[in-house]
């Protein structure tokens, strides 16, 4: 009996591994600009594949095209979860080139960056509608989470019935306030982390495996 | 402890005046309301029905039966309600310089917010000024116990107009306008169940342009709901207001 059970279990493990191998979940990393989405995407990709996803910057809207890292295999508690990470441009309702001038950028470059960022938001919203199986919503824990963009995007994600994890990023900074984010979205699980420093990444991967595995 | 500072977690009695000038501990100006139980008398709920009428959503949203909570359904209604207005993909992209609704010009887009005054104080504040009558209202008999000392104290003292900061006119406006008692958006608390907030948000969005407004080259305003809602999407913007879109492979009528 025990042998048969074992064989059956191992067969079902192989089957589920096969299915998950064929069909990695596409997880969109969403959030406002400068929340640390690319830093997180790079952290995850480097931890599990050795490669990065894209360049990080303290200047908002560094990511202006959605970037994908496919077949990231995360191993957790003996289980293996395969996901495609989609790092998306920061979503905002307003893009203004003058914001970039403060970062020593020429006007022409700032205008182009602004235009590309706007296109990037359109693309991110399109991906949200069509192409993701789950969402990691990244927030800068030092910023006020009660914004129109956050409320609207979380509402859209909920209306799509997509699994969502809220990541309270930048907890390495003194001003970080995770409780404020938990209060803003009590209906969802909030995971504190510092993608830059790698703080609390074990819990991050546990939750990713739980939610998207 | 119905009120809680969202910043440091300090709690306040219902109707407490301490919050009116910000959290004494951390200076935070956002508070969430946690009713002791569902029947607790809650002035904002009295002022605003929890499920506001939604003609656009109910007309067009019948096809979707999922219920994933009030916030989600309101957004879904918004999505469905807006889907009929996307006939012209180019309508939203142009050199229109009408400032229109500007979601980011206010650092805090929540309705009724005022950077100078605590977020959560709209209800007790306006209640004080427009109903000095000590009668607590229609639900008083059922919830007399809800009238705690903090509420009674707050009710007993009506601030004089001279004490009000010039930048915080909501109390004066409410007092002078009896119609504001019913559904003024400034009465909507930040953290109450989301329908009033989202209804307000939807009204604002309905007043917005279509998907992308070009204020001038390099300055754009985006209507996220519209961008989310459309099947085709904008892949390149030109400085002169022209743009490229990618249309879906299978175009619906």
Image (cartoon, coloured by chain):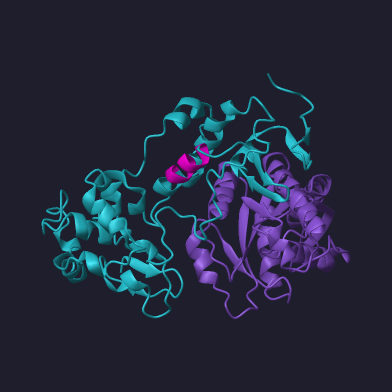
Chain colours: A purple, B cyan
Q: Is residue B203 magenta?
A: yes
Q: Main secondary structure of the magenta part?
A: helix
Q: Which residues are magenta?
A: B199-206
Residue at the spot x=57%, y=51% of the render? A154
Relative side of B1 to A82, left or right? left
Relative side of B158 to B2, left or right? left
Residue A202, position as x, y percentages in the image: 70, 71
Front position in the image: B143 or B242: B242
Front position in the image: A14 or B210: B210
Answer yes or no: is residue B178 visible. yes
Residue B84, position as x, y percentages in the image: 57, 26
Front position in the image: A185 or B88: B88
Occupied quadrant, residue B15: bottom left
State the count of labels: 0
Residue at the spot x=71%, y=52% of the render? A28
Which quadrant is home to the C terminus of chain A?
bottom right
Front position in the image: A163 or A29: A29
Answer yes or no: is residue A3 visible. no
Relative side of B187 to A200, left or right? left
Q: Is residue B102 above or below residue B160?
A: above
Relative side of B27 to A27, left or right? left
Residue A190, position as x, y percentages in the image: 57, 64
Residue at the spot x=11%, y=56% of the render? B133
Q: Is residue B179 above or below residue A167?
A: above
Occupied quadrant, residue A51: bottom right
Residue A141, position as x, y percentages in the image: 59, 69
Q: Is residue B5 magenta?
A: no
């Amino acid at each position: 009996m025990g042998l048969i059970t074992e064989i059956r279990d191992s067969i079902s493990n192989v089957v589920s591994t096969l299915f998950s191998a064929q069909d990695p979940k596409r997880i969109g990393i969403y959030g406002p600009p400068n929340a640390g989405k690319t830093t997180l995407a790079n952290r995850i990709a480097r931890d599990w594949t050795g490669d990065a996803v894209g360049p990080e910057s303290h200047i908002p809207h560094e990511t202006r095209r959605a970037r994908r890292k496919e077949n990231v295999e995360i191993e957790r508690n003996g289980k293996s979860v395969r996901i495609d990470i989609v790092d998306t441009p920061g979503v905002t309702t307003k893009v203004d080139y003058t914001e970039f001038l403060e970062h020593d950028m020429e006007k022409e470059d700032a205008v182009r960056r602004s235009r590309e960022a706007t296109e990037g938001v359109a693309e991110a919203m399109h991906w949200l509608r069509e192409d993701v199986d789950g969402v990691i919503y990244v927030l800068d824990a030092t910023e006020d989470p009660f914004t129109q963009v956050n409320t609207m995007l979380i509402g859209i994600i909920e209306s799509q019935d997509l699994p969502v994890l809220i990541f309270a990023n930048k907890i390495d900074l003194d001003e970080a306030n995770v409780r404020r984010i938990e209060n803003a979205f009590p209906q969802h699980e909030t995971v504190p982390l510092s993608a830059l420093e790698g703080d609390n990444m074990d819990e991050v991967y546990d939750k990713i495996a739980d939610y998207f595995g | 402890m119905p009120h809680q500072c969202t910043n440091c977690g300090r709690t306040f009695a219902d109707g407490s005046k301490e919050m009116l000038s910000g959290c004494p501990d951390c200076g935070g100006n956002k508070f969430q309301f946690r009713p002791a139980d569902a029947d607790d008398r809650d002035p904002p709920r009295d002022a605003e029905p929890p499920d506001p009428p939604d003609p656009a959503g109910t007309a067009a949203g019948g096809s979707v039966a999922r219920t994933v909570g009030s916030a989600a359904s309101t957004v879904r209604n918004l999505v469905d309600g807006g889907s009929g207005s996307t006939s012209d993909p180019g309508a939203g992209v142009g050199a229109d310089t009408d400032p229109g609704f500007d979601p980011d010009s206010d650092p805090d887009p929540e309705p009724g917010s005022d950077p100078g005054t605590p977020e959560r104080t709209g209800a007790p504040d306006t209640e004080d000024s427009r109903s000095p009558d000590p009668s607590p209202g229609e639900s008083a008999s059922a919830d007399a116990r809800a009238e705690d000392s903090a509420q009674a104290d707050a009710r007993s003292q009506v601030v004089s107009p001279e004490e009000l900061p010039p930048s915080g006119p909501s109390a004066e406006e409410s007092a002078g306008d009896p119609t504001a008692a019913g559904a003024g958006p400034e009465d909507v608390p930040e953290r109450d169940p989301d329908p009033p907030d989202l209804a307000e948000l939807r009204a604002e969005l309905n007043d917005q342009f279509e998907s992308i407004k070009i204020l001038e080259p390099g300055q754009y305003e985006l209507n996220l709901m519209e961008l989310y809602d459309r099947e085709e999407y904008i892949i390149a913007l030109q400085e002169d207001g022209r743009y490229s879109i990618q249309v879906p492979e299978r175009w619906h009528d």
